[in-house]
Every structure is written in structure tokens, then in C-alpha cells.
Image (tube, rainbow, N blue to C red):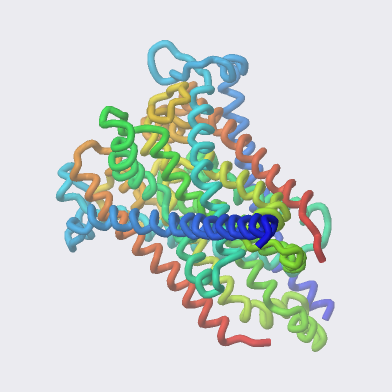
Amino acid sequence: MSVAAGLRGRHILLRRLKGGAFLYLCVAATLFGIVALGVLLVTVGAAGIGRLNLDFFTSYPSRFPDQGGIRAALLGTIWMMAFTALIAVPMGIGAAIYLEEFAPRNWLTRIIETNINNLAGVPSIIYGLLGLTLFVRLMDLGRVVLAGSLTMALLVLPIIIVAAREGLRAVPPSIREAALAVGATPWQAVRFQVLGPALPTMLTGVILALSRAIGETAPLIMIGALTYIAFDPGGPSSAFTVLPILMFNWISRPQAGFADAAAAGIIVLLAVLLTMNAIAIVLRNYFEGKRRW
Amino acid sequence: MALRRAREWPVYAFLFACAAVTILTTAGIVLALIQETYHFFEEVSIAEFLTDTEWTPLVGEKHFGVLPLLNATFLIAILSMFLALPLGLAAAIYLSEYAHPNVRRVVKPVLEILAGIPTVVYGYFALQFISPEIIQLLFGRDTSLFNALSASIAMGIMILPLVSSLSEDAMRAVPQALREGAYGLGANKFEVATRIVVPAALSGIVAASILAISRAVGETMIVTIAAGLQPNLSWNPLEGMEAMTAFIVQVSLGDTPRGTLEYSTIFAVGMMLFLSTLVMNVAAQWLLARFREAYE
């Protein structure tokens, strides 16, 4: 074998080695995220599992770390999310229908679309400052469920709009054209022909958007959702707290017992979120298999 | 027909109103911030705000220099990118260039779970696990439990899926023909990935990184819980330091009456935060639009 061929062989070997090493690096990087998720879940699970019992769900917060529960916060989260959904879902779907189906292609539409992109990038705590100024002070609602819901609704609105538009876009134009051809008005075409098939995709996006709102903490601290509530919040004008804020409060306390209580609360929070995500995925897979054009 | 259409105008008006709410939201944010920020700058000069190196608005002799907060925010955000950018990029290369579609179908949603975990949970993780089990183990038990580095690591894990997802989208948009051309010239997978795909997707990768930094800058709960509430102008990530968002939370947890200078400070800091993230988001969108490689 000539010297040149030997060198070339070594060169190819080197390139192959580099390629192999690179692949392992990439796999390792991908695994890092998965391992981090695993470590996080195990850490939380190990610390919190001991506190998870029926009392934890039915008790009010306490100054004794091993006695407090999440009752008030869980109910607060449910109240707040119910009103958030009530406000944000119709509004988000309405805006999506307007932008996707009826908006003229002009400067105003372009501004609205650019603005939605930018809103999605505004830090959530800034929405808190808006909620504090607009809903708590200016509209004088006070530090109540409704103020929290309105703030959260504005926060998730851009996400819902984007998801709902995707659902509408997936319905082929021929459906609309057929409806228009047999004499439907544009609104009738959308209302009776487009909205139905678009609904599953929209629903998936809506669930994911709402699951984000459940975990939000900062904006609600801004509007003054209290940390210590020892009564059941009873409607839109009641003072309230939510799960993430109670978790934050417990995490910030120095006594070790509160950290475990926080971990137990986090298990509940993550269980709710994972369930919502699973429902969204199942819905999507179910309807994806069903509809064919 | 015309009549039916005319009767429908309230529907169209309602739909337009829904879309218009998004504009009003932005207007509301800007007005709320400007109003209180104006009050703030009536009493504190912009020069002091931007150059004073001390931030003590709540106690004793008052100083209103935003630099310690700004420094903490960006130090933590940039450190988190040291973790998220290489790992996110490598994961994106793996998922886009190497992974079997079945592997990808499983791994991608799992990574995206990381992005959906509430930030208060990352705060718990940083304070209860990363800080005592990793940072104090590596740097000694006398390291402060509240430190910028543990917040950065938790933040890095949080924004990793953002980097990997957006970068992967950009890489998958690179046409197959470019890869095949390189294979035809004798390149192997590693060379195609690093010399063809990554350069071709660069604008998307840079945009993803900017969006990730912007997310880290605006993040609140991780820095509030794990980095501490002590304003500290330092580049040592093992020290505790207060970020802009953490200060806003700190003030609103206390009972600062409206109309006081202390109340206005959170809006001035909020304005700073809003402008920082806005500039980054606009830059990322501009990059994506300007350098979009049109291969069709």
C-alpha cells in the first residue's frame, strides 16, 4: 500500500470518528432534557408524596407546616379559570374568525396581526401591571377573582387566537365556496360549515392555552391575589388565592416542612396540567383519524 | 340576500371587536406603564436611574439606579443561554437530521413538557435541588443558597425546548436537495449537519436564541425564588442578586400605597423590562422575515 493511500485511509477514519462522536454528543444533549425532567419529577415526588392525603385537599393553609392544605387555593384556581375560559374562549375564537375569514387585507389587519405576535412575547408580569392599573384600580374591581380572570384572559388571548386560526385554516376553501354557491351569506358559511370541522383543533389549542394560565403566578401576585385565605372563595367578587401563589408562599418560608407541603401542592398542579395536556393530545388524535376531505 | 347580509352586521362588528381587544391590550399596557413611569421621572432624573449603581428605593437613603437589577436580569438570562443554546441546538440537530421519525414523535412532546411546567415549579427545583445538591456541592457549603447560577440553570432547562423546537423547525425547512448535493460530493452526516444545514438555518437559529433570551429576561418566579431579593451589582453568579422582575414582585407583596414613589418604581422597572423584551422580539421577527431563505 502506498503512503498516500494510507494517509487517505487515516483521514477517512478520522472523519468517521468525528461524525460518530458528534452523534453521541447530540444524543446526549437530547437526553439531557429528558433526564432533567425526570430528576425534577422525582425530586418533587419524593418530597411531596408523604403529604398527599385527603386532609391536604380539604384543609385551609396553616402556620404549622404539617397541617395546612390547599382547599382555598384549589377552589380559587377553579373559580378563576372558569371565568378566564368564559371570557377568553369566545373572544379568542371570535378574533380568529374575523382575522381568518373576514378581515380585509389592509394596514389595520396587518397591525392587528403584528400586534398579536408581539403580545405573545410580552412578559406575564407586565400583564399583571396592566391588570393592577386597569381592573383593580381604574375599574375598581378590587383584588378579586374577576380581576384575576380578566387579566389572565388578556394573557392567553393571543395564544387562543393563534390556535383557533390554525383550526380554521385546516378547513379547505372548497367547503366555504360550496356554501356560498348555494346562497349562504359569508357568516352562514362559517357558522354552519367551517366552525364544526375546525372545532376539535381549536379545542386542543384552547385547552393548552388554559393550562398555561393555571400555572401562571406573577400576574396574579401583581393584582394582589392574597397568599393566606382561610375561607372558600365564593364567586367572581370574592378575594382569592390560586395554587401557584400558595406554592410560592410555602417555598419562600424557611421552615423545612413547608417545602414538602409545596412539593405536594406541585404534584397536584402538575397532575392537573398533565391531565389537560393528555386530553388535548387524545382529542387531537381522535379527530385527526376521523375527518378526511 | 342583501337583506340577510345587512342583518348580519352585528356579528361582523362583534368579531371585529374581539380582534380589536388585542390592540386595546397593547395600548393599555403602554398607557399604564407610561403614566406611572412619568410620575417616577418627575422625582428621579433619568440620568440617576440609568447610571447610579445602587438600588435602594425602599429603605434608608434612597438610590434609584436600575443597573444592579438590569445587570442581574441579563447575567442570569445570558448564563442560562450557555446551557440552553448548545444543548438545544444539538438536540435540534439530532431530532432533525438523525432521529428515526418514531423516536422524534416520542422525544419531541416529552421535551415540550419542560416548556409547559409552571415557572414556580422551576423555582422550587432551583432552590431545593440545584442550589443545595449541585451548586453547594461543587462550590462549597458556604455558597449562598440564593444564587444567580442556580436560577440560570433552572432557566436554561426551561428555555431548552424553546431553542430546540424553533431551531429544529428552521433546520427542517432546509430543502433535502441541499443535503443530497453535499452527500454527492462525499460529505458524511456530521459534515452535512454542521456545514450545510446549520448555516442554511442560521437566521432561524439566531431568532430562536433571541426569543429564548427575551423569555428568560421576562421570567419572574425562578429569579424571585432562587436568585434572592438583594440588589447586588456583581458579575459573580455564585452571589445572590435581585432581577427586575423579582423587584416588581417584592414590592407588590408588601403593602406599598398607591401614589407613592415606591409604587411608581415598579412601573419604571416594568417599562425597562417591557422595552427590553420588545426590542428583542421585534429583532427576532425582523431576522426571520429578512433572512428567510426562500428555496421554493
Q: Nearer the viewer, residue A224 or B122?
A: B122
Q: Nearer the viewer, residue B33 or B166?
A: B166
- Whether residue B112 is visible: yes
Which residue is painted at 55% across and 56% down in the image?
A22
Instruction: Relative to A59, say whether A172 is above or below.
Output: below
Q: Nearer the viewer, residue B96 or B178?
A: B178
Residue B4's spot in the image, x, y percent?
78, 78
Q: Write down the quadrant of residue B283 in the picture.
A: top right
Q: Write down the quadrant of residue A92 in the picture.
A: bottom right
Q: Is residue B120 left or right of residue B55?
A: left
- Whether residue B165 is visible: no
Which residue is painted at 34% across and 43% down in the image?
B130
Instruction: Relative to A90, say whether A156 is above or below.
Output: above
Q: Is residue A182 left or right of residue A42?
A: right
Which residue is painted at 52% across and 56% down in the image?
A21
**In the orientation shown, which residue stands out farthest toward the top?**
B61
Instruction: Relative to B34, say whether B10 is above or below.
Output: below
Which residue is painted at 42% across and 52% down in the image?
B118
Q: Quadrant of the C terminus of chain B?
A: bottom right
Residue A101's spot in the image, x, y percent?
74, 69
Q: Quadrant of the N terminus of chain B?
A: bottom right
Residue B251's spot in the image, x, y percent?
42, 30
Residue A123's spot in the image, x, y percent?
54, 43
